[in-house]
Amino acid sequence: MLVNEVLHGDARILLPELAATGYGEGFRLAYADPPFNTRRSDRGPFRDQRTAAEWADLIKDVAAGVMPLLSQDGSFWLHVNDRQLGAAQGACDAVFGHEHFVGTISWERTRRPSYLPGQPLASTTDFILIYAKDPRSLRPFTAGTTEAGKRVPIAHRGNPITRLQFPIGAVRFTCADGLYQAGDHSTSGIDVRLTEDVRVNDGRNTTPLSLTLPSRYSQATVHGMLNEGAEFLIPRRPFRPSYLSPGGKPKAVSNIWSWRLDDNMPTNEDAYKEQLLAGMSPFPFAKPVGLLTRILEVATEPDDVVLDPFAGSGTTALAAVRTGRKYVLIEEHNSTIKNFIQPRLIGSRGNGPETGQ
Ligand SMILES: C[S@@+](CC[C@H](N)C(=O)[O-])C[C@H]1O[C@@H](n2cnc3c(N)ncnc32)[C@H](O)[C@@H]1O
């Protein structure tokens, strides 16, 4: 199987050909960013006027072409706008089956929404539908690791009242040393009782600490956590113990991707700027490299191969090169390959991709 290739042609024809020529199950990820069927003629280098049925057929054909090319643990990510979301989901459900639907990422695509007169609602988000080739084989999507030292309060309103015992030395106190007498430590509707006197010396309990509280954890869980070296902290009176997370665990990915929540999440304005900076005339609706980088980091590992059947300006290839992944792209317009993808890739690493067809 050849990789780092840009193929010229119609994805509906080329995807089945790839499956027939040794690419089957070779891709961990397929990212597809089709024309959104805005039915405007001014989309520059590609056609964007289809009937609703023609557009749904395009998505179905491409999804059907992609499916046999995905590895068992692979996934298909389809980027659409809010108008096409329903049709896109219908088309993918018809091909993959609804039980293969994993979720939808809402990506805030702009920092500068235009509130046009007469437009009832300003749209600022795109959607990325995700389908698994085999939901049982798909690994959880993660990005980065959890922070060390994050405080997780043990008491949680509404949980059943539980008696917890912490052995000598198991709890760190940042309040004054001394003898704390058994009694009520409830505040703001959370019932906490210190059931036996406890002595604190040098910031540690020198007698067992015994509490009743609406606990997130059972006594058995707390024992297990202590055996694994967990740290517990009581910062002040009234006693409200927290678990100090050791961090370093893979962080699950949320389905809201927004520059408001994450400084590193780019928008279409960034896509425009990065193309200008690279000396390109911006490709209409190119996605930012940072968005594709995030998708590749979440859905693949280094050396995996990613497929993009609607290549456009080749953003997926650029992100693959930057993250140590491999790519196969398909684009139906040769002029787009010559004027956008090739110069971009040459600019990114000093040589170009192979081109086929
Ligand atoms: C929205 S653009 C993709 C933009 C791309 N994600 C980027 O960041 O530059 C869609 C691209 O799909 C191409 N395209 C549309 N129909 C196609 C088909 N049937 N086969 C291959 N390419 C197609 C268009 O020519 C256009 O370049």
Image (cartoon, rainbow, N blue to C red):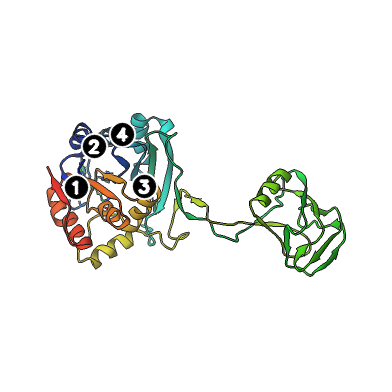
* Mark 2, other Cα within 10 Å: few <14 / some 14–19 / many ≥20: some
* CB under 8 Å between discs 1 and 4: no
Quarter of the rendering occupied by the C terminus? top left
The kind of residue on which mark 2 rests is: Tyr
Marks 3/2: CA–CA distance: 17 Å
Q: Earlier in the sequence, mark 1 or mark 2?
A: 1
What element does badge 4 sit on?
A: helix
What element does badge 3 sit on?
A: loop
* Residue 23 tag number: 2
Q: Is residue 248 visible?
A: yes
* Mark 3, other Cα within 10 Å: few <14 / some 14–19 / many ≥20: many
Per the image, the residue denoted by label 3 is 300
Marks 2/4: CA–CA distance: 11 Å
Q: Is residue 238 left or right of residue 33?
A: right
Marks 3/4: CA–CA distance: 16 Å
Q: Going 81% across and 58% down the picture, which residue do you hit?
A: 185
Marks 1/2: CA–CA distance: 12 Å
Image quadrant in which you'd find residue 243: bottom right
Q: Earlier in the sequence, mark 3 or mark 4?
A: 4
Q: Going 26% across and 54% down the picture, which residue do you hit?
A: 315
Q: Is residue 299 left or right of residue 327?
A: right
Marks 3/1: CA–CA distance: 18 Å
Marks 1/4: CA–CA distance: 19 Å
Per the image, the residue denoted by label 4 is 67
The answer to whether 212 is drawn above or below residue 349 in the figure is above
The answer to whether 98 is drawn above or below residue 331 in the figure is above
The kind of residue on which mark 3 rests is: Thr
Quarter of the rendering occupied by the N terminus? top left
* Residue 5 tag number: 1
> Where's residue 241, x and y in %?
72, 57
The kind of residue on which mark 1 rests is: Glu
What element does badge 1 sit on?
A: strand
